[in-house]
Amino acid sequence: MRAARQAALSGTVLLTLACSPAAPTVPPPPVTTSSPAPANFASVPWEGGPAYYAAFGKAAEAGWTDPSFFPIGVWFESVLEPKDTELDKAAGINTYFELTSNSSLPLVREAGMHAFPSGPNDSAGPETVGWTLTDEPDMWAGPGHGAWTGNAPGKGEVCVGEPCGYTVMKTLADKLPPDDGRLRYANFGKGVMFWETDEQAGTFVNDYTTATSADLYWYTDPNICTSPSEGPAIGVAPEQCRVAANYGRVVDRMRSLDLADGKLQPIYALIENGHPFTEADAPTITGDQLAGAVFNSLIHEARGIIYFNHNFGGECVSQHVLRDACGAAIRPAVTEVNRRVTELAPVLNTQSLVHLFSPNLDTMFKRHNGSTYIFAMPKRGTAPGPQALALPAGLTGEAKVLFEDRSVPVVNGTITDTFAAEHSYHVYVLPG
């Protein structure tokens, strides 16, 4: 359980969760749509993209309604001096999701960055666009309305008599200042993903937050591929476990739960950038795997990316992978993928359209400024190699492949391209 592991990050951080956050008194806006989709194409349900944040004054004032902005965050960092934000910005980070209790929100503000600290916090200003309620209460408190002792995991008894995760969420939410124009965010884990019924998990996802995420670390978790109650329980065979496509499955699960009440919220993807488990023989994510995990999450409609920035084991233990020597190998890949995501923000911030390009590929279809964008990568179980994408009628000529300095021809309404590995992705752009 990562919530328990995080107790090692800061002696006070988990205690702040026990005396933090407040109710999502600003109701999430209703499902909205963009301009009418082209004829014959259905639209993928969404919360409204950047327009969603217009209902939250602090986020709107901070520029989150700008279509050129896309949240790229880091989880549970510390900001103690200007150099901290300088290094994070250089890696493409613009938002802090949770911060250590000794962090300086004024330094975040001065850097022009954004934050979701636990709260309330008297130092909060325009940088604080939302509050973090807590992390993984579905795991350490469970689905239920039992009494909560106020303890965080590892600090003693948590629930009295029965699971109390819903009580934890409501208690923390009720401590926040009401109607303050800030989002209410929480991250969930294996309870929502594996262990709970849709009804139980849906209460966590729908009743307390206005932005949310869940984390499963498919590339690095030592148990997820073999434990009967984890990957295999949802049909993920061990040989298809450590693949980028499973990160999109997390977003799909969260979206399916979120859709249940008809009030949609942004779902962010949480991805490891190192060795987030204490077991020395657990895998460490590579740069190519990380990039694949990010783009598969985006293809499955993630509205932001958050990096889990800690090595709890492996050859180089660190709480600051994007800043120190422990991140030397992964940092260039993180920086480059963040650059690409930022460049694509105006496209990512449009509503996706429905079209089956290939049964073997995970794809996303968007139109922006007179161009068609197709994001594609292998589905779980698809072997590396050439794949054909059947295009919507009327698209001809050549498809430019972004970030690869090449194009592929459209032949009889189809483009054929090679996906060299399970984590390979391509972004195609065509006129029309």
Image: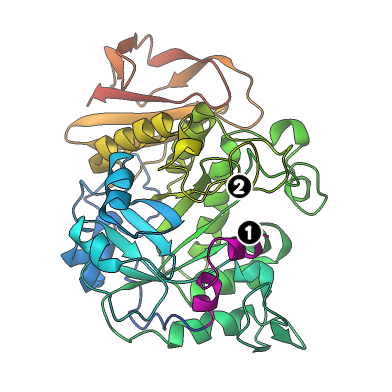
Q: Amino acid type of disc 2?
A: Pro
**Residue 367 percent location from the top left of the image:** 26, 36
> Disc 1, disc 2: CB below 8 Å?
yes
**Residue 366 percent location from the top left of the image:** 32, 37
**Residue 349 percent location from the top left of the image:** 28, 47
**Reading the chain from its start, which is encountered first: label 1 or label 2?**
1
Crowding around mark 2 (Cα neighbors within 10 Å: few <14, some 14 to 19, many 20+) is: many
Look at mark 1 in the image and give the residue it sits on. 2
- Can residue 128 be spotted in the picture? no
Q: CA distance from mark 1 to mark 2?
A: 8 Å
**Residue 89 percent location from the top left of the image:** 28, 45
The reply to whether the magenta stretch includes residue 303 is no
Q: Is residue 66 above or below residue 152?
A: above
- The span picked out in magenta is 1-18
Residue beneath the point at 26% across and 71% down? 56
Residue beneath the point at 50% across and 35% down? 290
- Can residue 224 be spotted in the picture? yes
Per the rendering, the mark at residue 353 is none
The reply to whether the magenta stretch includes residue 10 is yes
331 or 345, nearer to the observer: 331
315 or 411, nearer to the observer: 315
Look at mark 2 in the image and give the residue it sits on. 276
Residue beneath the point at 57% across and 20% down? 421
Residue 323: image quadrant is top left
Main secondary structure type of the part rendered in magenta = helix
Q: Which quadrant, please, contains the N terminus?
A: bottom right
Residue 404: image quadrant is top left
Residue beneath the point at 16% across and 66% down? 61
